[in-house]
């Protein structure tokens, strides 16, 4: 470990694993960090490939109109990120340059575009699936990966504002999606055992906004709709969610009009892997020198 570094984040910078950009939660990644990400992706694929999921890769931006319809702003307005762009003529451009030169706020002529930053890899998927019509009888299974954005700046390196999420998403009947989640709860435990890092699995809730959000969070926990696999990274007292196992019930099916072959409303569930968080957990518990990691872990990632 880095004996001269005051914090874990300092050590990550010192060893070139993360690159400081001057914005909390926004970091570059060094080559060794990316090598671990690649190893984790390959290990995840070895667990999921037997299911023959359809592979889809969306960009980190999504259609703003579809984002608005998703209901995300009702529950998590504090986390959302929009894309703005200059929308003026010569005079406005000259004014912008003058403000920039004077150190003033130059953003007044920026206008929201039709793109927002995706908060999770699966959000662009559901409207795309809805366009296909009723689900086939076996339902559908997807393998997703994307950069995601959530505005929660922090000195905790495990709370990045831009991060990658690998997801498997099941769409089908309630029985199909709950069985999927049960299988991945067991796979997730086995997966993290191979990484030789401490963890626990616990019921959880999403960070719903406002007073109404407290009621929604309590309901989510009471129904056991969300479980998280937690690993101590920045704090032992408050471990970090590195995997999540979510049952959305019919929320996305109703929102997007996704129907089953029998005419019912489709249910959805997903398992999400926080790729940066898992990578940070490995460096936290095995040290900054990958060559000194346990051979079993190196074999699991790159064997």
Image (spheres, grey):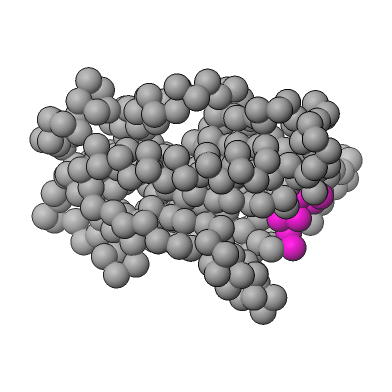
Q: Is residue 278 above or below residue 290?
A: below
Compared across the picture, whether 56 is left or right of 51 comes to right
Q: Residue furthest bottom?
A: 211
State the residue at coordinates (11%, 55%): 3
Q: Is residue 104 left or right of residue 278?
A: right
The answer to whether residue 148 is seen in the rendering is no
Q: Nearer the viewer, residue 19 or 254?
A: 254
Position of 126 relative to 104 (above/below)? above
- Which stretch is magenta? 68-74
- Residue 208 rendering spot, x and y as whole percentages: 62, 67
154 versus 143 height, above or below: below
* Quarter location, residue 88: top right
Q: Quadrant of the C terminus?
A: top left
Magenta-highlighted stretch: main secondary structure? helix
The residue lying toward the viewer, choosing from 112 and 72, is 72
Query: Which quadrant of the structure image shows residue 159?
Result: bottom left
Look at the picture and state if 189 lies above or below 221: above
Residue 118: name its quadrant. Answer: top right
Residue in view at x 56 percent, y 31 percent: 144
| Residue 293 image point, x, y percent | 14, 36
The residue lying at 32 percent from left, 38 percent from top is 191
- Residue located at (45% from left, 62% from top): 203
In percent of width and height, residue 72 lies at 71, 55
* Residue 20 or residue 9, whichever sits in front: 9
* Residue 202 part of the magenta-drawn span: no
Image coordinates of residue 1 in percent, x first then y, are: 13, 49
The one of 109 and 38 positioned closer to us in this rendering: 38
* Callout count: 0
Q: Is residue 207 left or right of residue 75?
A: left
Report whether residue 125 is seen: yes
């Amino acid at each position: 470990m880095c004996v001269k570094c005051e914090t874990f984040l300092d050590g990550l910078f010192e060893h070139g694993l993360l690159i400081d950009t001057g914005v909390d939660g926004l970091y570059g990644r060094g080559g060794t960090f990316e090598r671990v990400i690649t190893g984790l992706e390959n290990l995840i694929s070895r667990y999921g490939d037997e299911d023959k999921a359809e592979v889809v890769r969306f960009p980190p931006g999504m259609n703003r109109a579809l984002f608005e319809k998703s209901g995300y702003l009702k529950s998590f307005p504090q986390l959302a990120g929009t894309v703005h762009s200059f929308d003026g003529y010569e005079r406005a451009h000259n004014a912008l340059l003058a403000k920039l030169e004077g150190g003033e706020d130059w953003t007044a002529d920026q206008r929201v575009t039709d793109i927002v930053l995706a908060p999770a890899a699966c959000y662009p998927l559901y409207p795309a699936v809805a366009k296909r019509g009723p689900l086939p009888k076996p339902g559908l299974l997807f393998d997703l990966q994307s950069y995601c954005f959530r505005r929660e700046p922090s000195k905790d390196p495990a709370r990045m504002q831009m991060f990658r999420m690998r997801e498997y998403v099941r769409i089908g009947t309630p029985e199909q999606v709950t069985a999927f989640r049960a299988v991945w709860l067991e796979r997730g435990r086995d997966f993290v055992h191979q990484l030789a890092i401490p963890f626990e699995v616990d019921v959880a809730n999403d960070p719903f906004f406002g007073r109404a959000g407290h009621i929604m969070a309590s309901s989510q926990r009471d129904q056991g709709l969300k479980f998280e696999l937690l690993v101590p990274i920045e704090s032992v007292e408050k471990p970090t969610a590195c995997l999540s196992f979510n049952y959305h019930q019919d929320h996305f099916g109703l929102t997007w009009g996704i129907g089953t072959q029998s005419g019912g409303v489709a249910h959805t569930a997903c398992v999400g892997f926080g790729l940066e968080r898992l990578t940070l957990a490995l460096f936290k518990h095995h040290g900054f020198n990958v060559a000194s990691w346990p051979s079993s872990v190196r074999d699991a990632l790159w064997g």
